[in-house]
Image (cartoon, rainbow, N blue to C red):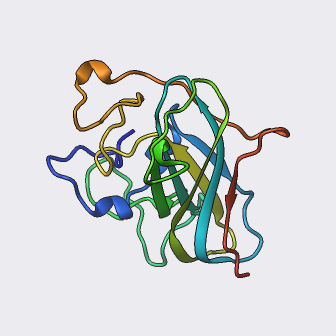
Amino acid sequence: MPYTENVHFTRTRDYMTDDQRFASRRTDVISFETDVLTSDLTLGGTVVADLLASISTTDADFVVKVIDVFPDDFKYAGATTNQSRDAGGPYPMGGYQMLVRGEIMRGRFRKSFAIPEAFKPNKIERVKFELPDVAHTFQKGHKLMIQIQSSWFPLADRNPQKFVNIYECDDSDFQKAAIRIYHDGTNSSSIILPVLK
C-alpha cells in the first residue's frame, strides 16, 4: 500500500494533504466512517488504536489513519468549476478525504519495543498503540473516517510478513499475508478518540 496515489522519484511531504480516496478504494484497506455529523466534533489529545487482529504469517504492520471526509457537494466560496478534463482549475473538494493523523505499528513490537515477538499464524492478538496527538474539529456536515492498512511505503519500509531480521532478509523472505481486523460482538477492535465536544 503506497502512501500516495501519485508516482514520485523521491518521497514528498505532500502526502500530508493528499486526498485519501485512492486508499479507501483499495481492497487491502478497510475503512469505517460515521454518519454525517449533525454538529461539530472536536478531538484534542491522543488517539488510541486497540485492534484485535490475526495474520496468516508471523509478522505484519498495522497503519491506522484518522480522516476528515468533506461533504460530497463541498466547494470553497468563489471557486469555479473546471468543466474540462485538462489540468488546472481548483481541486474537486467534494468528498475529499483529508488525512488528520496516521501512525504505523510494526506488529512484532505490539507487546514490547525491547523484545520483538512473532505472531502465531491465525491466532487473534491485540495490537494496541497510540497515534500522535490530534487537535482537529470535524465540522458539521463532514464525516469521520478510520482507515486501516498494512503498509505505508515508503514512509515505512516493507515488512516481509515474516518474523526475520528485516535488515538482513532477501527477496525470498517476502510473502503474502492474510490480515484480519476483527470487529464483531466477540472480538471488537476499537479506536479511542479524545473527544472534547
Check the image and report above or below for 23 versus 169.
below
> In the displayed image of the protein, which residue is found farthest to the right?
185
Could you tell me residue 157's position as x and y percent? 30, 43
Could you tell me residue 134's position as x and y percent? 53, 74
Q: Quadrant of residue 2?
A: top left
Q: If the image is split into quadrants, where does the N terminus sit?
A: top left
Q: If the image is split into quadrants, where does the C terminus sit?
A: bottom right
> In the displayed image of the protein, which residue is found farthest to the left?
9
Please tell me which residue is depicted at 21% across the width and 53% down the height of the picture.
11
Please tell me which residue is depicted at 34% across the width and 50% down the height of the picture.
84
Please tell me which residue is depicted at 34% across the width and 49% down the height of the picture.
4
Could you tell me residue 66's position as x and y percent? 55, 60
Please tell me which residue is depicted at 22% across the width and 33% down the height of the picture.
168
Check the image and report above or below for 104 versus 81.
above
Check the image and report above or below for 152 versus 65.
above
- Who is closer to the viewer here, 112 or 132? 112
- Who is closer to the viewer here, 59 or 148? 59
> In the displayed image of the protein, which residue is found farthest to the top?
172
Horizontal side of residue 176 vs 35, given as left or right: left
- Who is closer to the viewer here, 9 or 81? 9
Could you tell me residue 96's position as x and y percent? 50, 58
